[in-house]
Amino acid sequence: MKPFARKGITVGEGMPKTIVPIMPRDLDAALEAADDAVRAGADCVELRLDFCDEVRDECAMAKLCARLAGHLEGTLLLVTFRSKDQGGQETLPPDAYECLIGAVASVGGVDMVDVEIGFGDEAVSRMCALIREAGAVPVVSHHDFQKTPEEGELEALLARMERLGAGVCKFAVMAADTADALRVMQATERYSRISQVPLLTMAMGPAGGATRVLGELFGSSMTFCALGRASAPGQVQIGQARALMQGIHEISR
């Protein structure tokens, strides 16, 4: 796995980097929520565009991203539009989604942009190339809120993401029990041995909570944390997550 560094933060080595999602309706709410996340110790702020009032206005979203990027100096900015079938608030037609991704990727200071793999290989590959050309890192993602697939399926999914141009490969799947969580960790650990990019994997739900803090041991380089309201099932509050990961880091060394 080859780490990458931005703003003095190296993703892919040491403790998993913490991501706090913010779900604002407008710029003022975004700035306030981002400040709260930074004060709580977040390494990265995820801006969820699907919660924004003007999400269908690409220019407005680009301006919002530019203001937020300028506001965040030593903290990474990940920009995400999450579709309804992937756990989000809105759905966009493929062409509108691709235009939105292009608009926010071109904003200076945006560090990472999420691309949902469900839009198809050709479109995902095209969007990943566009994001890279703009100087950001594409995070190719997939969510399964029903189950945890078999290990072979999870590894194949990560390989497909990397092949399409992901700079970070992300999946989140629902764990019914501890065996599901272990399957996520085992698949991630195996693929991390051959991956050329950082991985971001987790099992959602109470049974998957351990996967959100044990990433340093099994090869997941980042983790989503809650600050008050969670954006996905099973997110750990950032203070608790940081304390647990610090303890694991010290023990593993």
Image (cartoon, rainbow, N blue to C red):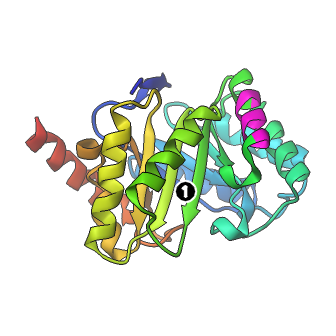
> In the displayed structure, would residue 131 be above or below residue 77?
above
User: What residue is disc 1 on?
Assistant: 21
Nearer the observer, 52 or 217: 217
> In the displayed structure, would residue 197 be above or below residue 26?
above
The answer to whether any part of residue 36 appears in the image is no
In this rendering, would 87 be left or right of 233? right
- Is 50 magenta? The answer is no
Nearer the observer, 96 or 121: 121
Q: Position of residue 99 (x, y in %)?
A: 87, 43
Magenta part, dominant SS: helix
Q: Which of the image's four quarters has the C terminus?
A: top left
Residue type for callout 1:
Pro
Q: Position of residue 21 (x, y in %)?
A: 54, 56
Q: What residue lies at 51% left-to-right and 39% top-to-bottom?
A: 159
Q: What residue lies at 35% left-to-right and 50% top-to-bottom?
A: 187
Q: Which of the image's four quarters has the N terminus?
A: top left
Q: What residue lies at 49% left-to-right and 31% top-to-bottom?
A: 74
Q: Position of residue 149 (x, y in %)?
A: 45, 64
Circle 1 sits in a helix, a strand or a loop, which is it? Answer: strand
What's the magenta region? Answer: 122-130
**Quick one: which residue is furthest to the front in this view?**
152
> In the displayed structure, would residue 15 be above or below residue 180?
above
In this rendering, would 176 be left or right of 51? left
Q: Position of residue 238 (x, y in %)?
A: 36, 58
The answer to whether any part of residue 44 appears in the image is yes
